[in-house]
Image (tube, helix red, strand yellow):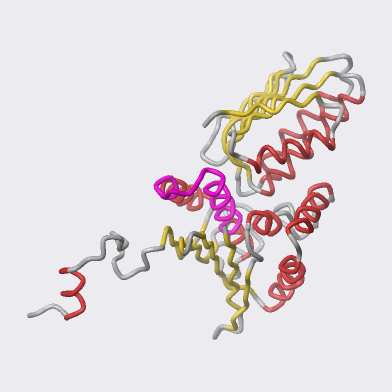
């Protein structure tokens, strides 16, 4: 369970979760037919890894071009779990990449920052 | 054999802005698809919608909202249309019928979807959409925030955020109707304005 790697498809993001390095990356599009099915394994494996993790540094990079409403909910759950890990004594840094004119993705990032204050949040605008 | 008079007229004097592939259709038609929807079909026509929008003069933020609305509507058809090719209880690889249309008129983009539903589901949709239509922009944002943090309803195949996402991006209240059809079902149509 040291890494979880799923290549990008036209409607699912590249998932590169290197648990040994504490480096989690999501990149691409996210509008699968069932977000619950797609993110189920990701949430479960990440949760298992975070269980019992202490004093670690976790770097999360999210660069999603688009995600649909059901993916939004799953991402919220993922960051809920990461926030919990941060409250338990780990350092969680989130680089939230968004297109400069993409207010929807920036707004969602700011919602995450507001709800999960234990996560160190950095909005990273991308010039289009 | 002479061609019908109307055809002649069109051939001789095509309007400069006429739809190049479908001369009979309105100039403002950006995209239209009717038929069966599956995840694969949505991904493929989603690419076409994106490319088509890139050729319009709509700013990036508007194009993103149109694409998002299109995806939410198309995925609703796949999950909830009563006209289904796959067994109704099959939860993945579904294929169901409906239509989605994107129009550009008077500086606004109109996105409309349609699919049949049974009476029971029509009632359920009404109970969700009536209050949503009456909400102000701020109330829609509040409801969105609350739903994002709430547990998902059991009969939803998504997050319960789909209609809120459409309403949040719409610059005017969403419009919808249920028209009875000859099979005892209702044709559900939903329109968003961006």
Q: Name the one closer to the observer, B179 or B120.
A: B179
The answer to whether residue A102 is above or below residue B27 is above
Q: Nearer the viewer, residue B42 or B190?
A: B190
Q: Residue furthest right?
A: A88
Indicate the quadrant where residue B167 lies: bottom right
Q: Name the one closer to the observer, B84 or A89.
A: A89
Foreground of the two, B155 or B99? B99
Identified at 19% across, 75% down, the residue is B7
Q: Which secondary structure dominates the residues rendered in magenta?
A: helix
Q: Residue B5 at x, y = what percent?
A: 17, 80
Q: Residue A126, percent across and down?
A: 58, 28
Quarter of the N terminus of chain A within the rendering: top right
Segment tinted magenta in the rendering: B52-74
- Farthest left residue? B1
User: Is B64 contained in the magenta span?
Assistant: yes
Is residue B143 left or right of B98 when viewed as pictured?
Answer: right
In the image, residue B108 sits, relative to residue B52, either above or below, namely below
Q: Quadrant of residue B69?
A: bottom right
Q: Total of numbered circles in the picture?
A: 0
Q: Where in the figure is residue A122, as x and y percent of width and height?
A: 73, 25
Residue visible at 70% across and 53% down in the picture:
B158
* B55 within the magenta span: yes
Image vertical order of residue B92 relative to residue B19, above or below:
above
Residue drawn at point x = 72 percent, y = 73 percent:
B126
Q: Position of residue B78 (x, y in %)?
A: 58, 59
- Relative horizontal placement of residue B99, taking residue A70 as reference (left or right): left
């Amino acid at each position: 369970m040291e890494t979880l790697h799923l290549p990008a498809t036209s409607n699912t993001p590249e998932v590169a979760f290197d648990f040994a390095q504490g480096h989690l990356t999501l990149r691409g599009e996210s509008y699968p037919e069932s977000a619950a099915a797609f993110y189920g394994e990701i949430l479960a494996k990440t949760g298992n890894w975070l269980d019992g993790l202490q004093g670690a540094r976790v770097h999360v990079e999210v660069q999603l071009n688009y995600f649909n409403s059901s993916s939004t909910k799953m991402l919220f759950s993922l960051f809920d779990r990461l926030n919990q890990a941060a409250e338990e004594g780990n350092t969680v840094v989130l680089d939230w990449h968004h297109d400069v004119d993409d207010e929807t993705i920036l707004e969602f990032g700011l919602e995450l920052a507001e709800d999960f204050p234990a996560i160190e949040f950095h909005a990273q605008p991308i010039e289009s | 054999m002479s061609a019908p008079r109307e055809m002649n007229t069109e051939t001789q004097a095509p309007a400069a802005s006429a739809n190049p592939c479908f001369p009979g259709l309105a100039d403002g038609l950006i995209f239209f698809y009717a038929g069966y929807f599956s995840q694969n079909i949505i991904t493929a026509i989603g690419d076409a919608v994106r490319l088509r929008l890139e050729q319009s003069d709509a700013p990036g933020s508007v194009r993103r909202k149109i694409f998002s609305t299109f995806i939410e509507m198309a995925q609703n058809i796949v999950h909830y249309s009563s006209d289904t090719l796959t067994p109704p209880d099959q939860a993945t690889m579904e294929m169901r019928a409906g239509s989605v249309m994107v129009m550009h008129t008077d500086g606004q983009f109109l996105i409309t979807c349609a699919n049949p539903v049974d009476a029971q589901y029509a009632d359920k949709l009404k109970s969700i959409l009536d209050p949503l239509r009456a909400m102000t922009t701020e109330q829609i944002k509040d409801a969105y925030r609350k739903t994002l943090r709430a547990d998902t309803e059991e009969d939803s195949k998504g997050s319960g955020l789909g209609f809120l996402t459409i309403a949040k991006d719409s610059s005017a209240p969403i419009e919808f109707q249920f028209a009875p059809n000859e099979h005892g079902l209702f044709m559900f149509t939903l329109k968003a304005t961006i």
